[in-house]
Image (spheres, coloured by chain):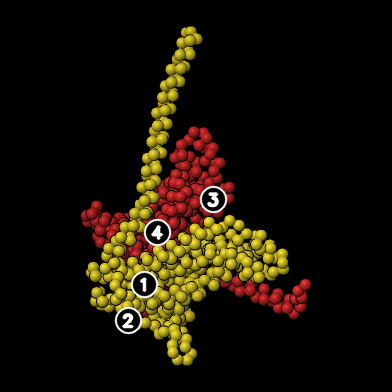
Chain colours: A yellow, B red
Amino acid sequence: MSITSTLTDGRVAGRAADSEFVRRLKRRRTNETVFICLGLAATSIGLIALAALMIDLAASGYPRLTADFFTNFPSRRAGQAGILSAWVGSLLVISVTAFIGVPLGVAAGIYLEEYAPKNIWTNIIEINVSNLAGVPSIVFGLLALGLFVYGFGTGRSIFTAGLTLALLILPIIIVATREAIRAVPWSLREAAYGVGATKWQVTQDHVLPAAVPGVLTGVIIGISRALGETAPLVTIGALSFIAFLPPSPVSADFPFISFAWLFEGFTVLPIQAFNWVSRPGDDFQSNAAAAGLVLMAITLVLNGVAIYFRYRLRKKLQW
Amino acid sequence: MASALTVWERRRQRLRERAIEFVLLVAAASSVFVTLAIVAVLIYESLGFFSSVPITDFLFGTVWTPLFSNPQYGILPLLGGTLLSTFVALLFVAPIGLVTAVYLSEFASPRVREIIKPILELLSGVPTVVYGFFALLFMTPLLQTFIPNLPGFNILSAGIVIGIMIIPYVASLSEDAMRAVPNNLRDGSLAMGATRLETAVRVVLPAAISGVAAAFILGISRAVGETMIVAIAAGQQPNLTLDPREPAATITAYIVQVALGDLPHGSLAYQTIFAAGLVLLLLTLVFNIAGFWLRHKFREVY
């Protein structure tokens, strides 16, 4: 065989390989395009589900959202039932939750980030916090039932509910506080130490103010979670039919402030919605949708504020 | 110069610093007390339960009728319901979550990602009672058009809605793990002529696999502990079945059902919810530890 023919053979083979390569390349590129379409589809399933949820709620709940709905007590007649005791209950429970959970969580976060020595105890606390975040909420309800309601005798009250939810959102607030504090640059602390500030002075006057937006984001997310939480309050025995309001915290007579409301029975928005959704009949279910719509609106507003904080934080955070 | 602090002022300041540190330590330790209290309460009440019901009956019995006149205490139907609804949720969320994560991490522009991620994360902020409403009054009727004999309460629709709820856990956390993969791995792969999809599937995903697995496990742990969706939409009769079209109760749904009735404190039926809660806690603990271990491993890679 001559040299030239070998060359031609090689060239022909090369051309065949080329066309094979081109064919495969085309397929690989098609695969990529197909995947991008798939990716768009998968991503939009989540978005579509969220939209369907809100449209479904709005369609059956919106007509019930009259002023009366907010100022009426629950009733046996669906058309006259309202969420007055539920939203007042939610407001009071969440105040207790914030009053207990925020200082406790922020203090724990400060300790773990600024004070804690690197030792086994710190390690145990850290592992514990991340484990606590994974405990199902209903288990917190069992804790509250066994320990608070029957052990400490705080009863099926607003105080018990607020305390339970505070413990539930503790990990969220601790983690957010730690992340916010960690983002404060060391130069700030060193400058303060350099002029003779004590550890607490540095923390209080310099680290914490810089960390406030991050902490606030975590607090808002935690509060939003607590507001929507149903299961642990069912186990401690929130009532779903409450046709009275707890005693007012402020009064015209001495001593002007009363804490009797803390130990009253209560209901909250999610419990009220749960009660209505489990009743037969469209009327009560549109009440449930309306209560759910109010809950969703609060959740969206709170999360929106948190997202906005985080967005501004990321833009501002160029130390 | 400003006058220096006197000895007394100094001593008072030191004392104050110590006191503050102690208060902060107590706050941090309180989270450990919460865990200890949870474990103590569950074990204490469960011990009362197991003193009247043999533990083997509890673990291996296939009938759960604690409120009947002839009560039987086999946890298997409840455990089966929990695992079945979790399995349905996982089947639903696995492809969607993974593809979403790969898409957002490797294909979407930063702008699109910045907009879509917070919206997706809203899915985990929706109150679960609203999801329950959605499962019962939207998902079930929707599924009934495809599966004609589907009962009004069923595991399938509850499981799918749980799957929707955990999309953010799975997709968003997997995406974080994939984006933590250093760019030089991607560059190397692309320089060898691989397409972006090939790079994503054969280079980025394997490098991030422990983080992705941790994200899935976190999602599973959420699904196991989910309460209101199953309590509302899955029916509350214990039912040992593998067919997700049937109604069945989960551990969490049982606890809700019992808590809604007014059970006398200290009765055996009251103690059952703590025994069931203990099983639930152990179940989620296993998943959380696995997830923690995987995340730890994932952090060590780079």
Labels 2 and 3 share a subunit: no
Instruction: Look at mark 4 in the image and give the residue it sits on.
Output: B123
The reply, left or right, for residue A307 in relation to residue B3 is left
Disc 3 on helix, strand or loop? helix
Q: Amino acid at mark 2?
A: Ala
Circle 1 residues within 10 Å: few <14, some 14–19, many ≥20? many
Residue A243 image label: 2
**Residue placed at 56% from the left, 51% from the top?**
B299
- Give the quarter of the image for residue A179: bottom right
Instruction: Look at mark 3 in the image and give the residue it sits on.
Output: B298
State the residue in front, A160 or B8: B8
The reply, left or right, for residue B204 in relation to residue B136 is right
Image x and y of residue B60, in percent: 38, 62
Q: Decide: marks 2, 3 in contact (CB < 8 A)?
A: no
Disc 1 on helix, strand or loop? helix
Question: Mark 3 and mark 4: span between their CA atoms?
Answer: 26 Å
**Residue placed at 28% from the left, 56% from the top?**
B245
Q: Amino acid at mark 4?
A: Leu
Q: Amino acid at mark 1?
A: Leu
**Residue placed at 37% from the left, 56% from the top?**
B164
Instruction: Look at mark 1 in the image and give the residue it sits on.
Output: A269
